[in-house]
Amino acid sequence: MERAITIRYQLTEAEFCRAHRCHVSHTWCRPVFRLILHSGFALLIVLGCVLLFRWNPIADGISVIFLGISWFTIVPVKRRRAADSVARRKFAGIADKGIEIEWLVGPAKLVNNSGPEHKDYTWQSFTKAVCTPAGLMLYRTDQIYYWLPRNAFKGDADYERVVELAKSRVRRFYNLG
């Protein structure tokens, strides 16, 4: 039997915000939202070019092109700030601030030892797994997830092993980079 991989980290506001940012990035960047964002950008650029070259009001054309570029750059920045604000408000309301979270991950099950709690999960109890550059999210539902930050692993080999376990045992697996 393989040894269990141990993951330990403190639940700080910064870690909570990072996990929430990854969650929001995964759920907000679905293809339909990306299509809307890029379509809005393209529409504003085309409208600016039409105004610029067809009717010749240079100021109007340039302003609409600028609006399109602003749309493409400001919307993602505002979304990130809003996500961080929501995460900070949620973190302020949880009782487990600052506790050490420990996961023991094996091929058959995962054990969560967080503060006074001790919970066992099978891999089948997770509906999806999302691998991000910052860590791994294991979802019980579309909104309830467990965060396993990459920096909490003892090394990259342990992180890659857990990602491979998630990929082979969780029904839906997404790799975001």
Image (tube, rainbow, N blue to C red):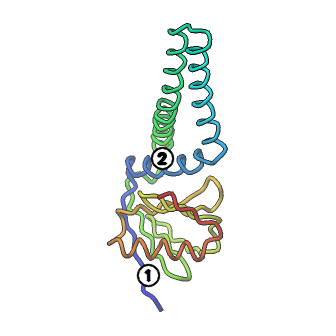
Give the answer, above or below, for where 134 lies relative to 47: below
Q: 74 and 51: which one is in front? A: 51
Residue at 59% of width from left, 75% of height from top? 123
The residue beneath circle 2 is 21
Label 1 CA crowd tier, 10 Å (few <14, some 14–19, many 20+): some
Q: Position of residue 161 (x, y in %)?
A: 44, 76
Q: Quadrant of residue 172?
A: bottom right
Q: 156 and 82: which one is in front? A: 156
- The local secondary structure at tag 1 comes to loop
Instruction: Single out the mark in the foreground, 2 or 1.
Output: 2
Q: Residue furthest left?
A: 154
Give the answer, above or below, for where 159 lies relative to 25: below
Residue at 52% of width from left, 21% of height from top? 65
Q: Residue furthest front?
A: 53
Q: Position of residue 84 (x, y in %)?
A: 46, 39
Which three-letter amino acid code belongs to the residue tagged 2?
Arg
Residue at 51% of width from left, 9% of height from top? 58
Q: Position of residue 169 (x, y in %)?
A: 60, 76
The residue beneath circle 1 is 4
Precedes in sequence: disc 2 or disc 1: 1
Residue at 37% of width from left, 47% of height from top? 14
- The local secondary structure at tag 2 comes to helix
Which three-letter amino acid code belongs to the residue tagged 1?
Ala
